[in-house]
Amino acid sequence: MKKVGIIPLRAGSKGIPGKNRKKMLGRPLFSWVLGEAIFSELDEIYIFTDDKKIIDFTTREYTWTEKVKVMKRSQESATDTASTETALLEFSKNVKYDIMVLLQATSPLTTKDDINLALKKIKNEETDSVLSVVKTKRFLWRDNGTSVNYDYKKRPRRQEFDGVNIENGAIYVTTRKQFEKTGIRIGGSIALTYMPEDTLIEIDEFSDWIVLEKLIENRLRKKKSNIDKIKAVVLDVDGVFTSGKVSNDKNGEFTKEFSMRDGMGLELARQEGLNIIVMTSEDSEIVKSRMDKLSVTDLYLGVKDKYSRVEKILKERNLIRSQLAYVGDDINDLANICSVGWGIVPNDGIEDVKLKADLILNNGGGTKAIREAIQFLIKYNSRFKTKK
């Protein structure tokens, strides 16, 4: 059975302008659910949008996986008044699938496990559709002053109260047969899949954004652990290997300055068994040339969604985030800095990033920052050496 995900995105957003591509903890909002979908059991994931910037970003960024597709959304299905069902009908006419999974970018706490559980539900329980809900033990009231889900005269204790299931708008799964019959996202026999209570929040207003960004940060920090040996370190380039400044020579070419002492730091790291990974959002021949000189073979150029790319690397090498250190200086490094064993920032990094770091170096980018970070990690790893 072919399982296809769709993430519908509109270019126009009145509540929060450019919402879907606005950066949440350093990543475009839509990439949070897309990244999880990539590592789920879905066979394909379609970014269905009329936003050219999102189309260009997705086309460029996710070439490392065959799962991600981009489909242009018509103007008719992308208006303020068009329903999501209008978009699904348009999509369904052009894509072959057995199971369609609607994922909402405004629910960035959705995980690959949530998606897989919903897929399992529709398969194992032989239902026509599945929707995600949150069970909450809140007491609900109507406008006329009558209670909805409990008898206020016999107020139950929380542990004795079953609570109520609330649709959280994150995941909707349907069979092609059900959707072609009804034209709506759920129908026929419907099953529920449960998600944590914090996923009840969707992004409609700016206040939702602030709350969800903090919730994501808290989740990422749960992946952290300072009890594992660091096996690999990911290094940004500009602001880490360099000061972040560029200059032009007389021919108008860009030049960068690299520290020789940082090069020796990489050699020390290799001697201690630390794998060196260099990842930068810039696609630069200057960087490539310098990394060749430093014998860096794990080089990733032009990476915008660094979190997803690191996730792929971890999966390929059977590592977990607590076994990783990450050295970065700007907001596109935030998600990784918050989630790895050691998130490290040079002294002259962006203040918002330094606030999330586990370690702020004494040195700045391009001035022995890498050397200092490596020396710290070597010393930290020494505690894991077998005692005789």
Image (tube, grey):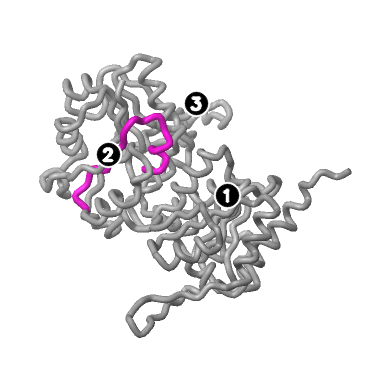
Please report the residue visible at 49 percent of the width from the left and 48 percent of the height from the top.
Answer: 310
Disc marking residue 290: none
Question: In this orientation, does residue 351 appear?
Answer: no
Residue 96, image quadrant: top left
Which residue position holds label 1?
A: 221
Give the residue type that dot 3 points to: Asp
Which tag, 1 or 3, sits closer to the chain's start?
3
Which tag, 2 or 1, sits closer to the chain's start?
2
Disc marking residue 46: 2
Give the residue type that dot 1 points to: Arg
List x then y, in percent, for residue 85.
19, 35
- What residue span does the magenta drawing correspond to? 34-51
Say if the magenta span includes residue 42. yes
Under circle 3, the secondary element is loop
Residue pushed farthest left? 76
Residue 209, image quadrant: bottom left
Total marks shown come to: 3
Residue 88, image quadrant: top left
Residue pushed farthest right? 388
Between 190 and 32, the one lying in front of the other is: 32
- Locate the C terminus by quadrant: top right
Between 187 and 163, the one lying in front of the other is: 187
Please report the residue visible at 49 percent of the width from the left and 66 percent of the height from the top.
Answer: 290
Q: CA distance from mark 1 to mark 3?
A: 31 Å
The label nearer to you, 1 versus 3, is 1
List x then y, in percent, for residue 72.
18, 45
| Residue 329 left/right relative to 34 | right
Give the residue type that dot 2 points to: Tyr
Between 205 and 60, the one lying in front of the other is: 60
How many residues crowd mark 3 within 10 Å: few (<14), some (14–19), many (20+)?
some
Which residue position holds label 3?
A: 162
List x then y, in percent, for residue 183.
17, 27
